[in-house]
Image (cartoon, helix red, strand yellow):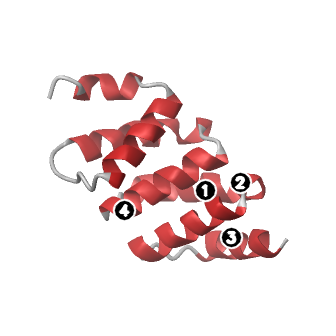
Amino acid sequence: GAALPKVPAFPTQELVNTSWAVARLSFSEGPLVHTLASAALARVPQYRARDLTNTAWSLARLRHADAALLRSLTDAAIRRIADCIPQELSNLAWACATLRWMDAVLLDAIAAQAIA
């Protein structure tokens, strides 16, 4: 309720952490997930590789296939793929598989980075 209007003002790390915590608790009810996704969409250009992959993991854990956010995360992840550590690559691949988000360019980038 009262906290929802504050979500868009969360600093980036708190936004990512809150998304992760909500996903970890499997709390997918109500407007909170939509509010977090909307706030994340506005922040994706500022996200580091870890922020991108944690957000993708959170969406997948919640089975929240927000197409606009997934597209934005995909584009940003492709640009930052070289910054991903193996765990982040794994989380990103798992998120894609779980959400059935099969972007060939992203999957190729993950594979190439994994064997680099």
Disc nearest the viewer among 2 and 4: 4
How many residues crowd around disc 4 within 10 Å: few (fewer than 14), some, or many (20 or more)? many
Amino acid tagged 4: Arg
Image height of 6 relative to 110, above or below: above
What is the spatial separation of the Cα atoms under label 2 and label 1, in whole angstroms?
7 Å
Q: Give the quadrant of residue 37.
A: top left
Image height of 19 relative to 88, above or below: above
What is the spatial separation of the Cα atoms under label 1 and label 3, in whole angstroms?
13 Å
Provide the secondary structure element on which disc 2 rests. helix
Would you say 97 lies left or right of 37 here? right
Q: Give the quadrant of residue 86.
A: bottom right
How many residues crowd around disc 2 within 10 Å: few (fewer than 14), some, or many (20 or more)? few
Amino acid tagged 3: Ile
Could you say which is closer to the camera, residue 57 or residue 31? 57
Disc 2: which residue: 79
Q: Would you say residue 114 is visible in this rendering?
A: yes
Provide the secondary structure element on which disc 1 rests. helix
Disc 3: which residue: 110
Residue 47 location in percent, x, y? 60, 40
Residue 93 location in percent, x, y? 56, 71
Could you say which is closer to the camera, residue 87 or residue 80? 87
Disc nearest the viewer among 1 and 3: 3
Residue 94 location in percent, x, y? 51, 71
Name the residue rendered at 47%, 50% in the picture: 55
Which label was assigned to residue 75? 1
Would you say 37 lies left or right of 77 here? left
Which label was assigned to residue 61? 4
Name the residue rendered at 67%, 59% in the picture: 78
Could you say which is closer to the camera, residue 45 or residue 18? 18
Amino acid tagged 1: Asp
Q: Earlier in the sequence, mark 3 or mark 4?
A: 4
